[in-house]
Image (tube, rainbow, N blue to C red):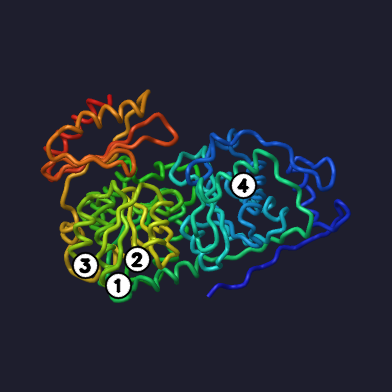
Amino acid sequence: MITGGKRLPVRSVVACGRPVRREWARVLSGLRELSTCGGALPEMPDLSAIVKAYDIRGVVPDELDESIARSVGAAFIRVTGASRIVTAHDMRPSSPGLATAFAQGATSQGADVVEAGLASTDLLYFASGSLDIPGAMFTASHNPARYNGIKLCRAGAAPVGQDTGLRDIKALVEQGIPAYVGTLGTVSEQDLLADYAAYLRKLVDLSGIRRLKVVVDAGNGMGGHTVPVVFAGLPIDLTPMYFELDGNFPNHEANPLDPKNVVDLQAKVREVGADAGVAFDGDADRCFVIDERGEPVPPSAITALVATRELVREPGASIIYNLITSHAVPEIVREHGGTPVRTRVGHSFIKAEMARTGAIFGGEHSAHFYFRDFWRADTGMLAALHVLAALGEQDKPLSELLAQFTRYVASGEINSTVDDQAGRMAAVRDAFAGRDGVSIDELDGLTIEVPGGSWFNLRPSNTEPLLRLNVEAPDAQRMGTLRDEVLAIIR
């Protein structure tokens, strides 16, 4: 299925007494020219501002530039011990240069690099999984144009976070990377888009569905690159919006989680009488769904829908959901004979639980959807195909189809800037701890359930002085009352 790569032309020169490629002669200079062959690289600046919990992300070039990307590439090889990796990048103007610099760092440590070129993040995960090699994706997802970043994974799309290599990479870059003595790696190019599309269509068969009219808003992000190939030949009449790749995001931010960024999509769905609308974020790893009325569909409802479909395929399977997901999800999973497994927020926790339990599927409130058959990685495109398959296999409109999966009223995530995260959290805990019928758990932040089916979760941000509040209740009145009570304590 995977086609062979094309090796780039090579011209040889001599450095440190051994032949190396002429294009890599300037790599040695870019790595802050070693004073002597076999010496160590000088110390790099503190990377604390850009190394996050699950990725590297910062403003280009002030915080993240090609020199840092080159050093991270070298450190990635040192930490993983990989002899071959794959890279891909999004449409941001700085992305190709960062990806090239990273490849230079990797090859300077003897690793071969497969460059997949323009790609969505889930296409990079496909590449890592299908080739069974570590990968690096250059994207800042939904962040504004001045940002960029690096998402790393081990072979088989296994996540790299602080505890699984990212902390070690940061330390190695800051301390200085030892010089490598040996044969430099090579670079080849490999276009994997067609293979990615074929693999997804194999996992979800849409060939027999009724013809659907679908609007897709790519937000000038990578969905504009992947959707036409994935949807090609399917019984779908596609209305594209903002498919032109433009990392400056001229129409709206590629963050569909913000309601203002789906207004155009909602209007277009109503205008053309579409059966559904789909919005992708900048790197197209998340999808958000709009029904035929132009109304947003909660990601928890998509999680429940996909879970029921996967449980038909594998009865009794485990389904992962994070603790901010609607309580409807575990209820529906149990009703369909599955085993719901609750986790902390964050893809590393989801993937770890999927590996531990063998879960077939997992979903988050943030519209990240994880599939065992996709190397336990998240792919918004596969979730979108499931939604369209479910819609096209029956005659009801999407709003009616999904009504059974929406049982509660949610606040959405509410951020509050605070000076003392721990103090405000403790105040909220104290306010509810002594009440009858209240249960409290601290798996991830503070989750408090109150009598009558209402609950909330309060979590501190890892990177900003924020507390994040999510509230859910059986009706809007109870949700609003609980939300306002908690906010009054926080603020």
| Quadrant housing residue 185 | bottom right
Viewer-nearest residue: 205 or 260 = 205
Q: Is residue 77 left or right of residue 471?
A: right
> Local crowd at mark 3 within 10 Å, few (<14), some, or many (≥20)?
some
The residue that appears at 51% across and 57% down in the rendered structure is 119
Report x, y in % for residue 133: 57, 63
Label 3 belongs to which residue? 337
Q: Are marks 1 and 4 in contact (CB under 8 Å)?
A: no
Label 4 belongs to which residue? 98
Label 1 belongs to which residue? 314
Disc 3 or 4, which lies upstream in sequence? Answer: 4
- Amino acid type indicated by mark 1: Glu
Secondary structure category for the residue under label 4? helix
Report x, y in % for residue 303: 28, 57
Secondary structure category for the residue under label 1? loop
- Amino acid type indicated by mark 2: Ile
Q: How many marks?
A: 4
| Comparing labels 4 and 2, the label whose residue is closer to the camera | 2
Secondary structure category for the residue under label 2? loop
Disc 1 or 2, which lies upstream in sequence? Answer: 1
